[in-house]
């Protein structure tokens, strides 16, 4: 959701800006723009609605030269996707240009004040208010002859004065027309990083634009502001003044963010799962103690032993992983688990058990609601941990400790490999908590052995790809789907339905298979396929009975079954066979054909798989 890039160096800024914006496309956007300061000290701006290709074509016609620049992909919040609303926005008499991620809540009152001071607005955005506000503060600063020697203090003071008046969230990158060697970046609530190169610096809202350019990253914290030139970087905190910044060296591989042989990131990431699952387990299996081990929980085994209740919070696909975790932890550790949508938890104020431990589950580590829920629980004094993919993300940083997924960058908007990695990590957690309580050494060892086979079983499940593509061709015209499963496969059904909705715009509902009789069965007809998850396990016969009920009403059935299951094949119209695995791992294997089904149906319907309409990869607004 919205992306920022910036460059200060000696090369043409626009080259990095355009490449960087392409790498941020996955976050979701509807318009884009860049601004540079030209060698003649002019602000050159290009903005367009739609894809980066359109912006690039515009720049080819009217270049934006210069070795300092900013760029933005916008996902509309305040004002529709138009050129006028696209970033960068200009401030004052075009003295500055800025790009902004986040939402300014008090923008209307500031706007009327600035209008009464004579500032003219050309957009409906909250961002333009920041641009004029900084310009207005800048006009009040004393003139300084040698700005560089003054360490750009008047610019910093102007930005700080403006930021102090804002309520809401922002990640900002700002250019000043009359100071073409310096950029200011600032952050409160919206992620922003600075990449340190040799004689150049980069700014971005996540690490993907920086792969191949630098691996040295400074993560800005809230209320921090960076003063950046080609050769220098200073970080200033709102309350503490100048602070020493830490440069972290990350492993950023360009392969991770390139498509390679695949047509879409989503398919690439689906096929990466045997590896991402292995990475989620790497170094975390303790064979000697028949348990799992984690490096970053930052709680002692004694503290963890005293956790008598687990609260899981998340949004979207990560919430489905939390539901899987609920089954896993309750079964293995016999601890009560509650799962809450983060957007509900943040305002619900539920009574919490004093021995409660929170896990926020999130791929991006930036989801606004999940962050707010984590903060609320921490504020009340409870330990709050994260299960997160993006290293250095806000939630990972703010949590008391946590577990990284190590799944590599997930670019496709529809989450796939992050989901299975989350379910692996929660299985490890369930094992860990189980062994803290009453799970025997033998049971722990058996679980480890089952986990060790998982990667190959997922690889085998991926071999269903051709069969699933055939099934997709049969049903791609249908406009309603039901996804049905029980126990561990109820969350799988929810996740399968979400995948289809997200990328093919088909209405799909996931339900516990038996609950289907209490309403959704009314939807069943010959044009409404039901996708059943019916692997061998404790509820196999029950789900088979639910399949009969759909069959009796003439609904087509697609069934995901265990290898060699002929019984289910007699009932279903189409069958996909996946390896038989322990029940706590079934969601990880059963979801594979459902991810593929959603993918192939979306492709068959001509949908933009990696950039589905209206969706954003990382939802950084409430
Ligand atoms: C957005 C994405 C979903 C994701 C959800 C939660 O809606 O489109 O794919 O599941 O956010 O994101 P998180 O990064 O917190 O897992």
Image (spheres, helix red, strand yellow):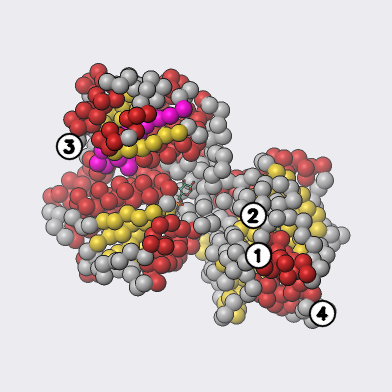
Residue lying farthest to the right in this orientation: 40
Instruction: Work out whether residue 375 or residue 590 is closer to the camera in this orientation and state it.
Output: 375
**Residue at image location 69% in from the left, 68% down from the top:** 110
User: Is residue 437 inside the magenta stretch?
Assistant: no
The dot on residue 143 is 4
* Front label number (3 vs 4): 3
Q: CA distance from mark 3 to mark 1?
A: 56 Å
Residue linked to disc 1 = 107
Q: Where does residue 556 sit, x and y in percent of width and height?
A: 35, 21
Crowd class of label 4 (few under 14; some 14 to 19; many from 20; radius 10 Å):
few
Task: Say whether disc 2 or disc 3 marks the residue closer to the N-terminus.
Answer: 2
The residue to which callout 2 is attached is 78
Mark 1 → mark 2, Cα distance in angstroms: 10 Å
Q: Can residue 284 be seen at all in this image of the molecule?
A: no
Instruction: Report the Cα–Cα distance between label 3 and label 4.
Output: 77 Å
Q: Are marks 1 and 2 in contact (CB under 8 Å)?
A: yes
Residue located beneath label 3 in the image: 538
Nearer the observer: mark 2 or 3; the answer is 2
Tell me if residue 182 comes above or below residue 572 in the rendering: below
The span from disc 4 to disc 1 (Cα, nearest Å) is: 28 Å
Within-10-Å neighbours for mark 2: few <14, some 14–19, many 20+ = some
Element under label 3? loop
């Amino acid at each position: 959701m919205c992306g920022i890039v910036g460059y200060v160096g000696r090369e043409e800024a626009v080259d990095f800006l355009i490449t960087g914006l392409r790498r941020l496309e996955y976050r979701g956007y509807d318009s884009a723009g860049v601004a540079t300061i030209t060698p003649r000290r002019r602000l050159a701006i290009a903005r367009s609605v739609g894809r980066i290709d359109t912006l690039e074509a515009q720049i080819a016609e009217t270049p934006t030269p210069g070795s300092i620049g900013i760029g933005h992909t916008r996902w509309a919040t305040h004002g529709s996707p138009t050129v006028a609303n696209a970033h960068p926005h200009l401030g004052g008499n075009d003295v500055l240009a800025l790009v902004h991620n986040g939402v300014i809540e008090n923008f209307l009152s500031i706007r009327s004040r600035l209008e009464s001071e004579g500032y003219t607005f050309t957009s409906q955005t909250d961002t333009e208010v920041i641009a004029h506000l900084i310009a207005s503060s800048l006009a009040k600063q004393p003139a300084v002859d040698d700005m560089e020697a003054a360490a750009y203090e008047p610019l910093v003071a102007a930005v700080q004065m403006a930021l102090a008046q804002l309520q809401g969230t922002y990640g900002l990158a700002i250019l000043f027309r009359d100071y073409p060697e310096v950029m200011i970046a600032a952050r409160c609530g919206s992620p922003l990083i600075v990449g340190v190169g040799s004689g150049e610096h980069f700014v971005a809202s996540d690490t993907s634009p920086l792969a191949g350019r630098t691996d040295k990253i400074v993560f800005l914290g809230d209320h921090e502001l960076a003063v950046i030139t080609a050769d220098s970087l200073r970080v200033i905190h709102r309350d503490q003044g100048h602070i020493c910044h830490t440069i972290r060296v990350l492993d950023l591989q360009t392969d991770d963010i390139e498509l390679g042989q695949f047509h879409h990131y989503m398919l690439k990431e689906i096929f990466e799962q045997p590896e991402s699952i292995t990475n989620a387990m790497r170094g975390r299996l303790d064979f000697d103690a028949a348990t799992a081990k984690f490096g970053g929980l930052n709680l002692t085994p004694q503290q963890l032993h005293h956790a008598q209740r687990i609260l899981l919070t998340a949004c979207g696909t990560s919430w489905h992983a939390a539901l899987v975790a609920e089954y896993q932890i309750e079964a293995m550790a016999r601890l009560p688990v509650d799962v809450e949508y983060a957007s509900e938890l943040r305002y619900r104020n539920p009574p919490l058990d004093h021995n409660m431990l929170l896990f926020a589950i999130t791929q991006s580590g930036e989801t606004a609601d999940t962050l707010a829920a984590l903060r609320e629980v921490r504020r009340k004094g409870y330990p709050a941990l994260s299960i997160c993919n993006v290293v250095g993300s806000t939630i990972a940083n703010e949590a008391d400790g946590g577990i990284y997924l190590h799944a590599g960058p997930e670019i496709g908007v529809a989450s796939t490999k992050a989901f299975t990695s989350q379910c692996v990590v929660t299985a490890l957690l369930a094992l860990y908590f189980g062994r803290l309580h009453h799970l025997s050494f033998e049971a722990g060892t058996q679980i480890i052995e089952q986990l060790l086979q998982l990667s190959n079983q997922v690889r085998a499940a991926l071999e269903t790809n051709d069969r699933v593509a055939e099934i997709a061709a049969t049903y791609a015209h249908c406009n309603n789907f039901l996804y049905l499963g029980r126990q561990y496969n109820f969350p799988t059904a929810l996740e399968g339905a979400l995948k289809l909705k997200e990328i093919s715009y088909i209405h799909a509902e996931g339900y516990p298979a038996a609950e289907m009789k209490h309403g959704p069965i009314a939807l069943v007809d010959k044009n409404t396929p039901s996708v059943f998850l019916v692997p061998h396990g404790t509820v196999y016969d029950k789900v088979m009975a639910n399949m009969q009920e759909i069959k009796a009403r003439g609904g087509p059935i697609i069934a995901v079954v265990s290898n060699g299951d002929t019984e289910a094949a007699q009932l279903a119209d189409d069958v996909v066979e996946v390896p038989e695995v322990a029940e706590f791992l079934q969601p990880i294997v059963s979801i594979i054909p459902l991810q593929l089904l959603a993918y192939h149906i979306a492709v068959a319907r001509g949908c933009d798989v990696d950039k589905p309409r209206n969706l954003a990869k990382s939802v950084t607004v409430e």
